[in-house]
Image (spheres, helix red, strand yellow):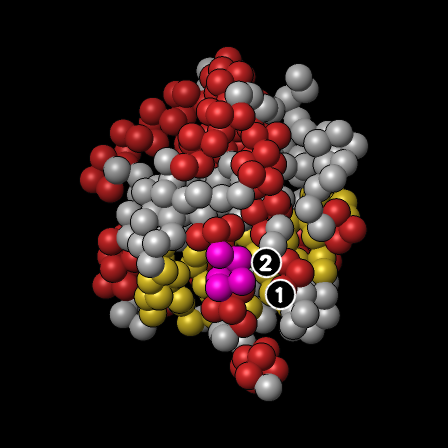
Amino acid sequence: MASRPDWQVEGRDWPNRAASRFVTAAGLRWHVMVMGEGPVLLLLHGTAAATHSWRDMLPLLARHFTVVAPDLPGHGFSDAVPAARLSLPGMAASVAALLDVLGLRPALAAGHSAGAAILLRMALDGRIAPGAILSLNGALQPLGDRHAAFFTRAARLLVGLPFVPSLFAWRAADRAVAERLLRDTGSRIDARGVDLYARLFRHSGHLAAALGMMAHWDLVPLLRDLPRLVPRLVLVVGQGDRAVPPVQAQAVQRRLPSARIITLPGLGHLAHEERPAEVAALILTEHPDAAEELAA
């Protein structure tokens, strides 16, 4: 099995494939989806996911927005990058370079899990200036909180061992293992979604990027800078999220009292895949023009 997913093999029936394009920016070849017309909406998926994460939301949102959704570096069908560029500032700079090449300026942005942290870093660094950022079960607190330094060192040690991503991929090649991993997040997604995750999990390169993000991220500066965030921040929280405890949203709100929390009962970490129409509606309400159109 190749270390990277092949667009002609794993991507042969990729959701919303007609919206896909491959673009060179920041020294790598990106897989990115662009769909619809209207104000630009930027969607960033989370660690170990890819554009398939938005499969059911994209067509709904494209009725109101020009939606741009890339595979993050090393994920899905986008090229891998050196480990140092998997840091939070590195990822933020790379996504900003992609937007520059596409000539798109987001009026609104939504990120799932780690994708939310990237959006916040981009906004704080002046790389994007959307009216609002929606954090969908955002991973915005350091792993292990007080023990974050230990977890980061451990992750760096793991990702530095070349056999580790291959070992993870070997285990996750079993669809039942992939399904169990997804269920452990507190979500139950459809069989199609499980199959797409399992398809990616078979490739050590995809998993190496996910491990590399964990190893090289430092969320402490992000939290320190959060009080100077200009865009509105909406924290959308799945009440049953087992990957990012819902209480973390309250900790973020204490740092940024203007942040608004919306709780989704009965949903887990992959809430946007469990109830895509409900989450798409939340995104729509954050852009005035789209909200008026929806109300009409």
| Magenta span | 275-279
Screen quadrant of the C terminus? bottom right
Residue displayed at 60% across by 36% down: 196
Tell me if mark 1 has few (under 14), some (14-19) or many (20+) residues whose alpha carbon lies within 10 angstroms of its own.
many
Name the amino acid type tagged 2. Answer: Met
Rendered view: 255 above or below 143: below
Image quadrant where residue 242 sits: top left
Q: Position of residue 95 (x, y in %)?
A: 60, 51
Q: Give the secondary structure at mark 1.
A: helix
Number of other residues with Cα within 10 Å of mark 2, as a class: few under 14, some 14 to 19, many 20 or more: some
From the image, tell me which residue sits under label 2.
57
Residue 25 drawn at (x, y percent): 71, 47
Q: Give the residue at the far top of this rendering.
A: 163
Is residue 255 in view from this perspective?
Answer: no
Q: Is residue 242 visible?
A: yes
Gap in Å between the C-alphas at discs 1 and 2?
6 Å
The residue under the point 24% across, 42% down is: 145
User: Which residue, given by chain and number where applicable, does mark 1 sit on?
Assistant: 61
Q: Mark 2: which secondary structure?
A: helix
Task: State whether residue 214 is above or below residue 110.
Answer: above
State the residue at coordinates (50%, 75%). Answer: 285
Answer whether labels 1 and 2 touch (C-beta < 8 Å): yes
Q: With respect to residue 93, does 133 lie above or below?
A: below
Q: Residue 193 versus residue 151: which sits nearer the camera? A: 193
Q: Residue furthest left?
A: 146
Q: Nearer the viewer, residue 21 or 88?
A: 21
Magenta segment, prevailing SS (helix, strand or loop): helix
Q: Amino acid at mark 1?
A: Leu
